[in-house]
Image: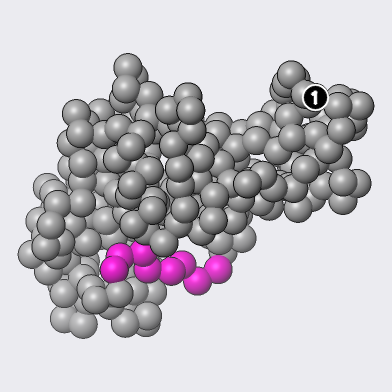
Amino acid sequence: MVERTESELKEKLEYALQLFYDDVLEKKDLRHFFFGMDLKRIIEDYHLYKHFVMAKPERYYKEMVMQTSPSEIQVKAPQFEEVLISLQANMKIAGFLKTEIPKMSVHVIEVIEETRAQKSDAEVKVWKPLEVTNQMVCDFYNRSRTDARLEKNGDIYASRGFMYPFWPRVALDTKQIIFIGQAFAASSFTPLTELQALCDQINEKVTQQTFSVREGPNGAVLFARHAFSYANGLPVRLLLRGAKQFAASFEAAVTMDTNQLLVKKTT
């Protein structure tokens, strides 16, 4: 990835979005993709919500990208593919490198899909920062066909409905949502060096998440953490999607443990 300042990246991306927006509106069979949306809203939402988009496995960027907006507002698959092609072509015109475009375009289109969804929402699905609590997040997960509970220390434990159990946490002081994944050593006698070797292999393969090994009171722990700020509001669709992707990446990591060094799941 080429090095750019934050302001340079912002200017280049906003130019690409302008080209993309104009290009889609010029095409009769695609212009409904931006129905009722203006360029200003698209750009503003991108800067507000871009950090909620989780990195994907590398293969995802090379395969057919799926729509993430609600089914009732999705466009036909060939049209969505044309929209993505337009975005990637205009990112190239704006000066992004060929190697950058697949990943960046997927992340951009996911935020645009959130903007499209918000436009059609019958009720507000972006929580105000002062509203966000552990209880609120826990209740939301339980309404979303997943299971969660509050633990004695106030943290959330999210289990069924996610590929691997994990702990989401609301940090009120920093206005962050923090996802924490842990897999515990199968034995307190498991050599730390073996678990570290496994962790190194995982970080080579599961590139969308950084894993580390920590020593706990009952032995070593494979650990991963991801945090994002909700200071500008918390879009709940992206909250759920990010949680599922975080859990999936942790499951992918634990699956690499062919020597049974880890307890596979906790309940």
Main secondary structure of the magenta stretch: loop
Query: Camera-side residue: 95 or 86?
Result: 86
Task: Give yes or no for residue 150 being in the magenta stretch.
Answer: no
**Residue drawn at the location 83% of the way across and 38% of the way down:** 186
Q: Position of residue 202 (x, y in %)?
A: 74, 42
Query: Camera-side residue: 204 or 132?
Result: 132
Up-down: is 33 above or below 97? below
Q: Is residue 163 visible?
A: yes
Toward the front, the furthest residue is: 152
Query: Camera-side residue: 13 or 232?
Result: 232
Q: Magenta residues?
A: 63-70
**Residue drawn at the location 61% of the way across and 34% of the way down:** 224
Left or right of 195: which side holds 264?
left
Q: Position of residue 262 (x, y in %)?
A: 80, 41
Callout 1 amino acid:
Gly
Left or right of 54: which side holds 138?
left
**Residue drawn at the location 80% of the way across and 34% of the way down:** 185
Query: Camera-side residue: 255 or 33?
Result: 255
Q: Is residue 101 visible?
A: no
Mark 1 falls on what kind of element?
strand
Left or right of 254: which side holds 34?
left
Left or right of 217: which side holds 120?
left
Up-down: is 107 above or below 71? above
The residue tagged 1 is 219
Q: Position of residue 116 (x, y in %)?
A: 20, 61
